[in-house]
Amino acid sequence: MAALWRAPRCFRRGPWLCRTVRALSGKSEYDLLVIGGGSGGLACAKEASQFGKKVAVLDYVDPSPKGTKWGLGGTCVNVGCIPKKLMHQAALLGSSLKDAQRYGWHVSHPVNHDWSTMAKAVQNHVKSLNWGHRVQLQDKKVKYFNLKGSFVDSHTIRGSTKSGKETLLTAENIVLATGGRPKYPANISGALEYGITSDDLFWLKRSPGKTLVIGASYVSLECAGFLTGLGLDATVMMRSIPLRGFDQQMAALVTDYMQARGTRFLKNCSPTKVKKADSGKLRVTWKYADSGKEDTGEFDTVMWAVVSLFQGRAPDTRTLNLEIPRVKINSATGKVIVDASEATSVPHIYAIGDITEGRPELTPTAISAGKLLARRLFGHATELMDYDNVPTTVFTPLEYGCVGLSEEEATRRFGPDSTEVYHAFYKPLEFTVAERDAAQCYIKMVCMREKEQQILGLHFIGPNAGEVIQGFALGIKLGATYSQMMKTIGIHPTSAEEVVKLNITKRSRKDPTVTGC
């Protein structure tokens, strides 16, 4: 591992500052310097190296307030998509054990889940990905520095170690890809002292026990969902609406299913304080928005997963010293303002991923944006990242996948008389023998109403929603129409085939429940 990092030749300038030989010569040492070793930053760096350019990546993870830390790879690999999906899978396996009995399997009771076994396996996989990223950088001759980067001037970055040792690096082009971190609410007593965030949950060695998840973001619902599925007591506290920014009919179905499966919801209320009770549990006080009444409850773990303008996740830009090169940010959000080419207000400084204003906070978009940026910088390419019709999935117990516009957004843009919504409630074949409730399994296709009926958005709630939506995303990206979708032959028997059978509109007010096979 030590062979992957070699200290540059340098001149000493005082006890803590090391300046590279090339930096002193006036020539930039690197063609590209990426600050941030998450999915987008690594993709950009590796793509740039393919053009024979000299590339370096700086990555440093500040421990969470609870002391949780991790390796190279960013949020997705360490405290996001990967561990989340694996714990979601663990919860689905628990549901499958219940189904198995209906299919003739003899399952011994009681069936118990061991958090520490799952957590160790998930964490070991994450660590293998950390190592894999380092090997890939070495193979592609990308220099990796475990340093925290900040600007000295528009072409010079100061890299700092945990002990305070500093190295100066210069580059012709700099890409900011530091991602975001969860925020604690500053106005709630005990929030920071007693709460955790998603930065900590996936690295807990022991079960979180009875858990209150505060917020109704996708992070909140996903975590509460798999905690419930693992047999834990999980409660979601939501101030207003769930899954803000998503189609709200679909969001309501997601939470209805979660509630039916055992997740508790405290609605229209906000926490006011958290303190340690004599029992050792955490006593949370909250207030209801409509009545102003207060209530309390005790929990083993309190997790913050809020989404709002000043709470939730924040771009990790505070220590970059962006004011030195005069990189413009949105003062309200702290995010970096970029144009269509990912360029900031400083021509040779770029930004990608979660720190950029107005971009979806999704790993695949950051990866694609990073690769395309490297190709434009060094490969004479001109293609820009297209942020329209990006598919995504919320991995709640009953998954919700979507691509394109929500029904609300389509109506806002084009008006209710210009849009048509085809929909259906269906029952996955797998649910039948298992006698599972399928009341929330639902598909909605939002189209233009004119003759061609171009598809504006597709929404799917059901098993394997991500796999279903990924397949249809290509067609919608290419401008597929309702008539083309209806000419597509379904694969039988699948849940996905229900998409190509949609024939009932909301406007008709007919019962959209699918009957028969």
Image: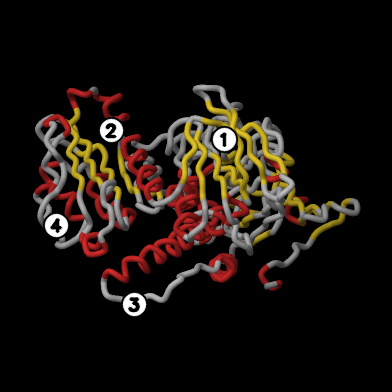
Q: Quadrant of residue 333?
A: top right
**Left-right relation of 119 to 451:** right
Distance Cα–Cα, label 3 vs label 2: 45 Å
Identify the colour scheme used: secondary structure
Q: Mark 2 points at which residue?
A: 407
Sequence-earlier tag: 3 or 4:
3
Q: Residues within 10 Å of mark 4 (few under 14, many from 20)?
A: some
Q: Which sits earlier in the primary sequence, circle 2 or circle 4?
A: 2
**Along the line of sight, which residue is nearer the eye, 135 or 414?**
414
Q: Which of marks 3 and 4 is in front?
A: 3
Amino acid carrying mark 2 in the image: Glu
Residue 173 appears anywhere in the view: no
Q: Which mark is residue 490?
A: 4
Q: Which of 112 and 347 is in front in this view?
A: 112
Q: Find the distance from the CA under tag 4 to the CA under tag 1.
A: 44 Å
Above or below, comparing residue 273 to residue 77 in the picture: above
Question: Which residue is nearer to you in this view: 507 or 351?
Answer: 507
Q: Can you see residue 435?
A: yes
Q: Which residue lies furthest to the right in this view?
A: 14
Q: Label 3: state its secondary structure.
A: loop
Q: Which amino acid does label 1 sit on?
A: Val
Residue 106 — which label? 3
Per the image, the residue denoted by label 1 is 336
Is mark 3 in CB contact (under 8 Å) with mark 1? no
Residue 226: percent from the left, percent from the top? Answer: 46, 56
Q: Which comes before the other along the chain, label 3 or label 1?
A: 3
In the image, residue 57 sits, relative to residue 151, either above or below, namely below
Q: How far apart are marks 2 and 1 (CA)?
A: 30 Å
Q: In which quarter of the image is residue 316?
A: top right
